[in-house]
Image (spheres, helix red, strand yellow):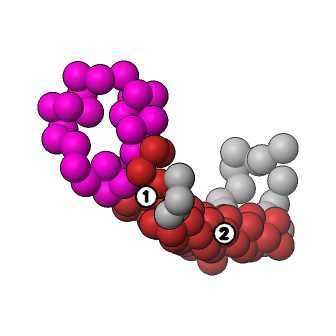
C-alpha cells in the first residue's frame, strides 16, 4: 500500500510519465494506421461513388467487388500483407512498453 506521507522519487515519476507518453504515441500511431487501412480498404471500390456505397448494403457492395477480384486478388493480398506487417510492429511496440513497465519496480 502507498504511504500517503511518502513523496515519490522524481526519477520514478519521470519514468512513469515517459511510459504514459509512449502509450499515447502508440495509441495515436495505431489510430493513424487503422485509418490508413480503412483508406486502403476503400480503394478496393474505385468504381463506386460514395453515394452508391451508402445506398446499397455493404455486403452487396463487397459482392460486386469480389466478383471482379476472383481471378486477381493481388491488391487485396497487398493491403492485408501491409496491415499484417503494420499491426505486428504495433504489437511489438506495445509488448516492449509492457516489458519496460514490468521491469520498472516502483514502491508498492
Residue at image point 81% right, 66% down: 102
User: In this rendering, is residue 51 above or below 27?
Assistant: above
The reply, left or right, for residue 72 in relation to residue 44 is right
Instruction: Classify residue 91 by image quadrant.
Output: bottom right
Q: Quadrant of the N terminus?
A: top right
Closer to the observer: label 1 or label 2? 1
Which mark identifies residue 37?
A: 1
Find the magenta span and give its range. Answer: 42-65
Nearer to me, 75 or 40? 75
The quadrant where residue 98 appears: bottom right
Q: Position of residue 35 (x, y in %)?
A: 37, 55
Q: What's the magenta bit mostly, secondary-structure-wise?
A: helix
User: Residue placed at 46% from the left, 44% from the top?
Assistant: 67
Label 1 crowd bin: few (<14), some (14–19), many (20+), radius 10 Å: some
For the view shown, which residue lies furthest in the bottom direction? Answer: 11
Sequence-first tag of 1 and 2:
1
Q: Nearer the viewer, residue 90 or 45?
A: 45
Q: Position of residue 41 (x, y in %)?
A: 40, 53
Q: Is residue 5 above or below residue 72?
A: above
In terms of secondary structure, where does tag 1 sit? helix
Judge from the rendering whether residue 5 lies leftward or rightward of residue 20; answer left or right.
right
- On whether residue 51 falls in the magenta region, the answer is yes
Residue 88 disc label:
2
Is residue 49 found inside the magenta-colored segment of the image?
yes
Vertical arrangement, residue 46 with respect to residue 89, above or below: above
Q: Is residue 15 visible?
A: no
Amino acid at each position: 500500500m502507498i504511504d500517503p506521507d511518502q513523496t515519490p522519487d522524481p526519477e520514478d515519476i519521470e519514468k512513469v510519465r515517459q511510459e504514459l507518453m509512449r502509450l499515447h504515441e502508440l495509441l495515436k500511431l495505431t489510430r493513424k494506421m487503422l485509418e490508413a487501412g480503412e483508406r486502403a480498404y476503400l480503394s478496393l471500390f474505385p468504381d463506386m461513388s460514395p453515394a452508391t456505397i451508402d445506398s446499397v448494403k455493404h455486403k452487396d457492395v463487397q459482392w460486386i467487388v469480389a466478383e471482379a477480384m476472383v481471378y486477381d486478388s493481388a491488391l487485396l493480398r497487398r493491403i492485408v500483407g501491409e496491415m499484417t506487417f503494420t499491426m505486428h510492429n504495433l504489437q511489438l511496440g506495445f509488448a516492449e512498453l509492457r516489458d519496460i513497465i514490468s521491469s520498472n519496480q516502483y514502491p508498492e
